[in-house]
Image: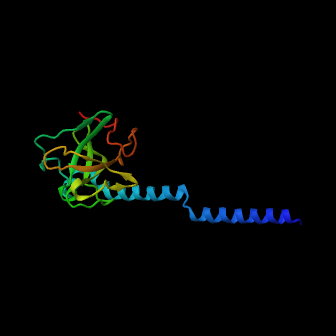
Amino acid sequence: MGAKRVILLALLVTAAAVAIGYAAWVPSAGAERSTFDRQLQQLKAATARYHSINQALAAGYLPPGGQMPPPAFTCVRGPTGNMGYHFENPALMTDGVINLTQPEVLLYERKSNGRFRLTAVEYYMQADQTPTAPVILGQTFFGPMPRHHDGQTTHYDRHVWLWKDNPNGLFDNWNPTVSCP
């Protein structure tokens, strides 16, 4: 074998070894996706019981103002869809902690029979509790934004349309398929 062939063979073997080592070191897109999918499944499992509004109320999720039935309860409408009805957990909203399986807010839409249907969760953190916008499921929170009603402060938030498909995207604030009667 000639010297050129030996050098070329050595370069090819080295390049192959480097490529194999790199492939083994870098996580595949599938591995990253499965972690994301596992997190979504954890969130679904943790929030499935809130399809029952009574379970949500028992866990401390209340309409703004803290009364049920609320004196004034509005379906939040927006420029590219709606959010629906917000049920907030004041203890979670003020604890300064973002926990994947304990969203601070649950979003519902009201069905024609008057019952509520769980559509999404919302994570919320007061702006004075963090120096930067939090991140959940790889998504940076929106904000800081002004309070939306009495009882809220300037805050960061992030929606996850876990229980209703959103053509605008899983993490968009507004969902055009949510109806506000």
Residue sitting at 20 percent across and 49 percent down? 154
The image quadrant of residue 110 is: top left
Instruction: Tell me how the rendering is colored.
Output: rainbow
Instruction: Report whether 115 appears left or right of 36.
Output: left
Q: Which of 152 and 38 is in front in this view?
A: 152
The image quadrant of residue 125 is: bottom left
Residue sitting at 80 percent across and 65 percent down? 7
Q: Which of 65 and 180 is in front in this view?
A: 65
Q: Where is residue 157 in the image (x, y as percent from the top left)?
A: 28, 49
Q: Residue furthest front?
A: 3
Q: Nearer the viewer, residue 158 or 38?
A: 158
Q: Where is residue 156 in the image (x, y as percent from the top left)?
A: 27, 50
User: Image quadrant for the N terminus?
Assistant: bottom right
Does residue 80 lie above or below 65 as drawn? above
Q: Position of residue 96 (x, y in %)?
A: 23, 60
Residue sitting at 39 percent across and 42 percent down? 165
